[in-house]
Amino acid sequence: MNKKRQFVVIGLGRFGGSVCKELIEQGNEVLAMDMDEQKVNDYSRIVTHAVVADSTDEATLRSLGVRNFDFAVVAIGDNLQASILTTLLLKEFEIKNVWVKAKNNYHQKVLEKIGADKVIHPESDMGRRVAQQMSDENVIDFIELSSDYSIVELIAVSKLEGKTLIDLDIRARFGITILAIKNGDDINVSPDPDYRITAGELLIVIGHNKDIKRFEEVDM
Ligand code: ATP
């Protein structure tokens, strides 16, 4: 289990709300803040503390001890001015990790300029993810490590049936590495070179996106 961390989450719309729930689920402490009393009431039983407050008011943030937090999430959507001012105040408080939800590219640019540590576009990020998964039926899940490199969970297709990792010589031929092989609940981390693949197993591979694609498309 990760060490318990303390987060402040500002804005309890759908995005901020689900961030709160998951942070609590993962065993963290969460101070949730919204101007809307109803939203605060909805979350008061879920989070550690929930307060009705305007995050653009510096004195309020000070009195709530927000500067003592190491992590902050700004999940204010429509009111760009409030989102920007809140981020500015949090960075002035020298909070090390301020993650902010952006509405558009202009918003993102300003947030980066004033020191947001990560800018999130939930709708476009999710849209891209769904499209990438839908366009390749063998990809079950993936983690983008950078724009070029990923960890991908691939279904072992029938052309791989019965082949060992030595037969496939994946690292030399494609420059990618099989980190693990999953079969139902069993996971084989760093499989031996003489491991024989069964079609339908899940291969967890790391590498350049182009090389992973090449591996998927090649005739064995
Ligand atoms: P969703 O995540 O549901 O898509 P959204 O992007 O539409 O949300 P909004 O509903 O505009 O975002 O804002 C999210 C929440 O932020 C709202 O509950 C709103 O009351 C709250 N909020 C907006 N401005 C402030 C502020 N200055 N201080 C505290 N909370 C604020």
Image (spheres, rainbow, N blue to C red):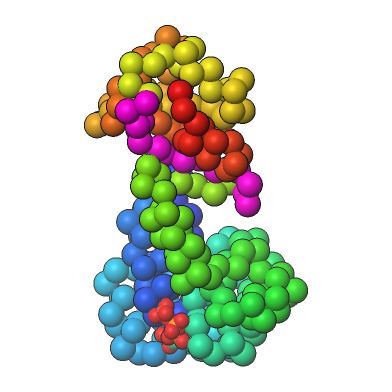
Specify whether residue 9 is in view. Answer: no
Residue 94 on image: x %, y % = 69, 67
Asked where in the image residue 188 lies, by quadrant, the reply is top left
Residue 42 on image: x %, y % = 28, 80
Residue 110 among magenta residues: no
Specify whether residue 37 is in view. Answer: yes
**Nearest the eye: 53 or 199:** 199
Look at 43% across and 18% down and name the residue there.
191
Residue 60 on image: x %, y % = 55, 85
Is the residue 76 above or below the residue 206 in the image? below
Residue closest to the far front: 219
Asked where in the image residue 63 lies, by quadrant, the reply is bottom right
Asked whether, in this view, residue 26 is left or right of residue 7, the answer is left
Q: Quadrant of the N terminus?
A: top left
Residue closest to the far top: 194
Q: Quadrant of ligand 1?
A: bottom left
Residue stretch rendered in magenta on the structure: 146-159
